[in-house]
């Protein structure tokens, strides 16, 4: 949407900038990990069999993200620059993972990115769709 608004609003002197933060170091990761652990512990045997590996993988990802995410101050600095610069950038990618995601969007078709995300979240490797 910002790419559409930018040329439409430019003649009016309005700058449009998109701030795209990746993972940010906040307490949300600890809360998500705790909620996931509670969910895993409450699952019946069938639920644990179906979703246990995925929940464990998400917990590992949450712990890694909590450790490697960008500092909130970096997002604030990007927003401040976008709001105060005479000529703000059109896009602010904050954090290493935001840059990686932008590269993947440019390099891979949607279904390939979906498969990659599914693999990362599955906890047990590639899964072939049966339907």
Image: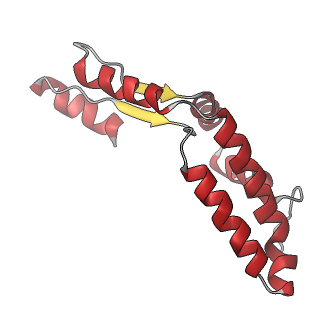
Q: Quadrant of residue 19?
A: top left
Q: From the viewer's perspective, is 127 left or right of 40?
A: right
Residue sitting at x 84%, y 74%: 130
Looking at the rendering, which quadrant does residue 40 occupy? Answer: bottom right
Residue at the top extreme, as displayed = 86
Residue 116 visible in the displayed image: no
Judge from the rendering whether residue 115 lies leftward or rightward of residue 3; answer left or right: right
Tell me: residue 122, above or below residue 40. above
- Residue 99 seen: yes
Q: How far across and down, in percent of the image, does residue 22 sit?
A: 55, 37
Residue at image point 53% right, 30% down: 71
Residue 65 in percent (x, y) is at: 67, 41
For the residue pair 32 and 106, the one nearer the viewer reads as: 32
Q: How is the rendered protein coloured?
A: secondary structure
Residue 124 in which image quadrant:
bottom right
The residue shown at (43%, 30%) is: 75
Q: Residue 74 vs residue 112: left or right?
A: left
Along the line of sight, the residue nearer the viewer: 8 or 85: 85
State the image coordinates of residue 59 (x, y, percent, origin top left).
74, 56
Who's the residue at 37% across and 33% down the image?
18
Tell me if residue 65 comes above or below residue 62 in the rendering: above
Is 95 situated above or below 24? above
Q: How many marks?
A: 0
Please identify the quadrant where the N terminus is shown. Answer: top left
**Relative depth, front residue between 39 and 8:** 39
Task: Quarter of the image for the C terminus: give it.
Answer: bottom right
In front here: 127 or 69? 69
Q: What is the x, y in percent for residue 128?
A: 86, 64
């Amino acid at each position: 949407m910002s790419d559409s608004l930018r040329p439409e609003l430019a003649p009016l002197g309005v700058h449009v900038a998109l701030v795209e933060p990746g993972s940010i170091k906040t307490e949300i990761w600890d809360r998500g990990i705790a909620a996931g652990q509670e969910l895993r512990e409450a699952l019946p045997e069938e639920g644990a069999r179906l979703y246990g590996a995925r929940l464990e993988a998400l917990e590992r990802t949450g712990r890694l993200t909590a450790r490697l995410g960008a500092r909130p101050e970096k997002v604030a600095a990007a927003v401040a620059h976008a709001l105060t610069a005479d000529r703000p950038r059109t896009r602010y990618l904050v954090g290493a993972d935001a840059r990686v995601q932008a590269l993947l969007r440019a390099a891979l078709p949607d279904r390939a990115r979906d498969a990659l995300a599914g693999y990362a979240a599955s906890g047990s490797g590639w899964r072939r769709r049966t339907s």
